């Protein structure tokens, strides 16, 4: 497809969801509308199901921006994949680890982290690496299951505070990030425009330059 003066491949980075089989609640109920004999589906779920974005009001009790209060531009833009595959398993990521990645984010970019290590072997963010990302002035941080947000609850909370205090949003439960290694791409992950939501499921896609 043609986009922004170039030719791009569309890559879906979203995890498929099956009602009734997810770790978090997701139920879909079908009912018939008597007024015109058409069908409507009721979706009973949570704001953190599947591939989703999280905003500051997910972390702060009051005064923080909700999904609807953030600019739509916070959820689309130039993406940069930081390839952390040379990082040792199970370590806390340092600023030096992020500096060694081939591609580096610029202000206003969307940074995606990928290590190739899953489960207990996945490295994790620390206050130092979160501060590095904040100082690079990214606007959105994307993760799959190869990088964790921290090693324990206090560290996870610290990482949230460092980034979300600057309105940097999180895009979680991505997939296929390894297909972006060494590629130029744009990323789009738009939340639902519903007042008061802290987070929202999204359909995350990358437009990869050919």
Image: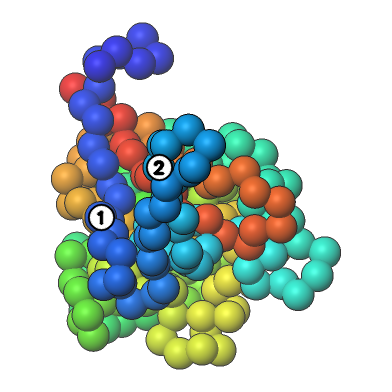
Q: Nearer the viewer, residue 61 or 185?
A: 61
Q: Position of residue 76 (x, y in %)?
A: 49, 36
In this view, which residue lies farthest toward the front?
A: 34
Q: Residue 16 bears which disc, if any?
A: 1
- Quarter assignment of residue 152: bottom left
> In this picture, is 170 found above or below 46?
above
Q: Which residue is mark 2?
A: 39
Residue in the picture at 38% in, 54% down? 30
Q: Residue 97: where, in percent of width, then height?
A: 34, 65
Q: Quadrant of the C terminus?
A: top left
Relative horizontal placement of residue 21, taking residue 65 as reference (left or right)? left
Snapshot quadrant of residue 26:
bottom left
- SS class, disc 2: strand
- The mark closer to the camera, 1 or 2, is 2
Residue 141 seen in render: no
Q: Residues within 10 Å of mark 1 (few under 14, many from 20)?
A: few
Q: Badge 2: how crowded within 10 Å, few (<14), some, or many (20+)?
A: few
CA gap, disc 1 and disc 2? 23 Å
Residue 48 lies, in percent from the top left, at 48, 66
Residue 69's x, y, as percent?
Answer: 73, 47
Q: Nearer the viewer, residue 13 or 167?
A: 13
Foreground pick, 8 / 107: 8
Decide if residue 72 is in sight here.
Answer: yes
Q: In the rendered view, tell whether residue 201 sits above or below residue 209.
A: below
SS state under label 1: loop
Query: Residue shown at 25%/76% (left/top)?
Result: 122
């Amino acid at each position: 497809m043609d986009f922004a003066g170039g030719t791009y491949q569309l890559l879906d980075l979203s995890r498929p969801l099956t009602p009734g089989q997810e770790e978090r609640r997701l139920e879909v109920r079908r009912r018939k509308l008597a007024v015109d004999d058409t069908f409507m589906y009721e979706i009973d779920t949570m704001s953190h199901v599947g591939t989703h974005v999280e905003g500051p009001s997910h972390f702060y009790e009051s005064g923080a921006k909700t999904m609807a209060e953030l600019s739509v531009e916070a959820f689309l833009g130039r993406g940069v994949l930081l390839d952390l595959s040379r990082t040792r398993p199970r370590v806390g990521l340092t600023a030096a680890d992020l500096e060694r990645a081939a591609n580096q984010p610029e202000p206003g970019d969307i940074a995606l982290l990928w290590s190739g290590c899953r489960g207990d072997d996945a490295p994790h963010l620390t206050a130092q690496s979160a501060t590095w990302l904040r100082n690079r002035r990214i606007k959105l941080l994307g993760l799959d299951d190869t990088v964790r947000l921290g090693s324990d609850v206090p560290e996870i909370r610290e990482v949230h505070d460092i980034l979300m205090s600057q309105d940097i949003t999180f895009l979680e439960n991505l997939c296929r990030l390894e297909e972006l290694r060494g590629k130029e791409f744009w990323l789009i992950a738009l939340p639902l425009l519903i007042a008061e939501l802290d987070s929202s499921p999204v359909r995350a896609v990358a437009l990869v330059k050919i």
